[in-house]
Amino acid sequence: MAYISKRDRKREKDRKIAARNRREIIAARLTRRDLMKAGLLTGAGYLILKKGLSARASTPRDDPQSPPTTPFVEPLPIPPIAQPVSSLNPVPMVNPNTAAGEGRTRPHQALNLFPPQKLYLVTQQEVLKSVHPELPLQRLWSFNGQVPGPTYHARYGEPVLVRNVNGLPLDNGGFGLPSVSTHLHNGHTPSESDGFPCDFFERGQFYDQHYPNVLAGFASTHPPNGDIRESMSTLWYHDHRVDHTAENVYKGLAGFYLLFNDFDTGDETTGFRLPSGEFDVPMIFTDRVFDEGTGQLFFDLGNLDGILGDKFLVNGRIQPFFEVKRRRYRFRWLDGGPSRFYQFHLTKASNPSQVNQFWQISNDGNLLPSPKLVNNIRISVAERADAIIDFSQFAAGTVVYLENRLEQDDGRGPTGDVLPAGQGDKVLKFIVTGDPVVDNSAAPTATTQYYQLPGTADAPRITRTFKFERGNGQWQINGKFFNCDDVRFRIQQNSVEKWILQNSSGGWQHPIHIHFEEFQILKINGANPAGVNIARKDVMRLEHNMQVEVYFRFRDFLGRYPMHCHNTIHEDHAMMLRWDIDTTGDNKTNP
């Protein structure tokens, strides 16, 4: 038997006690703010060691390690397409139906203007799911039993209403709060249906969310149908409950919402002729930690920098494989968080150093003006990128890995180093099968234009500056923490604004998400945007000491919306603010 020193035995004992106490703290459903108020959390974000209440030690090296798993033993799961129902009982109403148990508190702005043509009934519920055959079944939270949730196929001009029912258990199984607010990320959505973090509803309640699926500008700059240049394609939905977004999404509450129109049709024989059907594949990338003793999903409440997992999941499975035919595919890549950034490369197993190019056709939910030939794609949490990969360039039997080569040691953000080919994290294995098959999609080389950009010619009504920084052990915007009732500034409806986003937090990076409207980048550190940043976006990746100027049009709907860091650990610890759209606006330049 190998000799174990007294010091090592003590460290192992402390580690087990810390792991047990972490689970007890989380099961008690304490928030990070609760821990700080109780004096149990340091300004650096670490839980203080106390009798009966110890947690992680003072260095990240004591973070738990997941049990080993064999990669590439299961196929990539494809989330099912959400199916509508014929009716809902009770019937959806403009005003909140509180008597029937609806958690909504504000009337629908556009239910009568855009009556739903499809209805969906979704129950958020616990489910036992496998993420890998070598790990036990996990207690995950789902939409209709699916993790990730079902993929919505929606169309512009076809409004829908989704009734979310909170059927989550009181026993959270270790972490998570069964109180939810579902956000349609990147949706041009009325405020009451946006999934504002403070519009949460409890167990046993439901919430009717109305998605008009209408182009921006329908009531203002481009009546009556909106501006086709504002078309979106790859959206997603996820829990957004104030203080608990990271935990609830970590447990599984996320899925895709895809929008189609007369150009991006969902049929590769028409419109832009983008790959469709089985060749249009959504992928959500997440990284997770599993308890080394039990194999169960683990979440560390004491970590304020950001949580990094040592297991990489695609559509809810650890390192799956995907058999592809020798033709073009459209992949919709989403960084589902909570804190890791990715830089994806295609690495050929037989020749890792070979550079394999592919096409990027979108940045976030919006198609680029034209396809861009790239060697890699970098995304931070909540960013999306649609890629077209032509597997006809590879012989049958070729193995190609989707490899993340971006070095990141902790939740603060990437180090800036890109690892050599073959030395990164292989998150997905492509296996090229068979002979070439029919491909009715258009080659990206034949496409010169998707949508033109709306432009930035209209003068902004006001310029506002936002500093994303750290203070008092928490995350702040302009020196303040988030409060549901604190309206930091008011935007005049149908106006144009310029925002300056500044990363003032030292060694951290922040993916900043602004709800409701996309922006165009004017400047990055004083320089004009280039490449794939000549686009419309809803998440801005604020890297070290970066300043970005962005341009907005705010149209059509009124109400409250947030801006926040989408490193969900930062978001839950107060790096968020509320802003409202009304008919007058204000002139706060540093709100």
Image (cartoon, grey):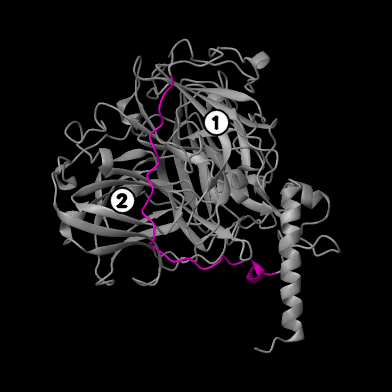
Task: Using residue 464 as the reference point, say whether residue 335 is left or right of it.
Answer: left
Q: In this view, does 392 lie above or below 477?
A: below
| Quarter placement of the C terminus | top right
Checking the image for residue 531, the label placed there is 2
Q: Magenta residues: mostly which secondary structure?
A: loop
Point out the residue furthest to the top here: 112
Residue at the image point whose x is 47% and y is 57% from the top: 132
Q: Distance between the residues labelled 1 and 2?
A: 41 Å
SS for dot 2: helix
Magenta residues (range): 59-85
- Which amino acid, mark 2? Gly
Residue at the image point whose x is 35% and y is 38% from the top: 366
Assess whether residue 287 is covered by the magenta stretch: no
Front of the two marks 1 and 2: 1
Residue 76 x, y percent position in the rendering: 37, 52
Residue 339 x, y percent position in the rendering: 54, 54
Please tell me how crowded label 2 is: few (under 14), some (14-19), or many (20+) other residues with Cα within 10 Å: few
